[in-house]
Image (spheres, rainbow, N blue to C red):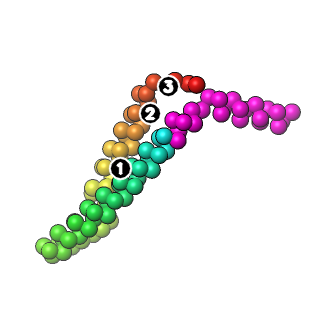
């Protein structure tokens, strides 16, 4: 009895959840994180170089928060906006 209910609940979830869209969105999120990591490496190295040239006290935590958080938040907000505004065509 309990196993039948569990089986029915899992089947209903699989029917209503759009797995193709989930895989696509997961792939896009992975690509965004990869690009974010590469940009972080490039920009943090450039900022370190400028700070070293001009003898500025380099604080990597402060630099990372200063540019990375707004970029990451912008990316996540755009993705959430896309998820909320897309027309869901349930299969």
Residue 34 image position (x, y, % from top left) = 40, 55
Disc 1 is placed on an element classified as: helix
Comparing labels 3 and 1, the label whose residue is closer to the camera = 3
For marks 3 and 2, the one nearer the N-term is 2
The magenta stretch is: 1-23
Q: Residue at the spot x=86%, y=33% of the render?
A: 1
Instruction: Say if the magenta span includes residue 15.
Output: yes
- Count of numbered labels shown in the rendering: 3
Disc 2 is placed on an element classified as: helix
**Viewer-proximal residue, 27 or 77?**
27
Q: Residues within 10 Å of mark 3 (few under 14, many from 20)?
A: few
CA separation in Å, label 3 and label 2: 9 Å
Residue 82 image position (x, y, % from top left) = 40, 33
Residue 35, numbered label: none
Q: Residues within 10 Å of mark 2 (few under 14, many from 20)?
A: few
Which residue lies under the disc numbered 1?
Answer: 72
Q: Quadrant of the C terminus?
A: top right
Q: Is residue 17 visible?
A: yes
Q: Residue at the spot x=77%, y=36% of the render?
A: 6
């Amino acid at each position: 009895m309990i196993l039948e209910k569990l089986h029915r609940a899992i089947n209903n979830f699989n029917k209503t959840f759009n797995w193709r869209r989930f895989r696509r969105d997961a792939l896009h999120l992975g690509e965004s994180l990869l690009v974010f990591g590469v940009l972080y490496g490039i920009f943090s190295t450039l900022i370190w170089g400028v700070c070293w040239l001009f003898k500025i006290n380099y604080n990597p935590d402060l630099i990372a928060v200063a540019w990375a958080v707004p970029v990451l938040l912008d990316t996540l907000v755009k993705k959430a906006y896309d998820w909320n505004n897309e027309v869901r065509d349930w299969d």
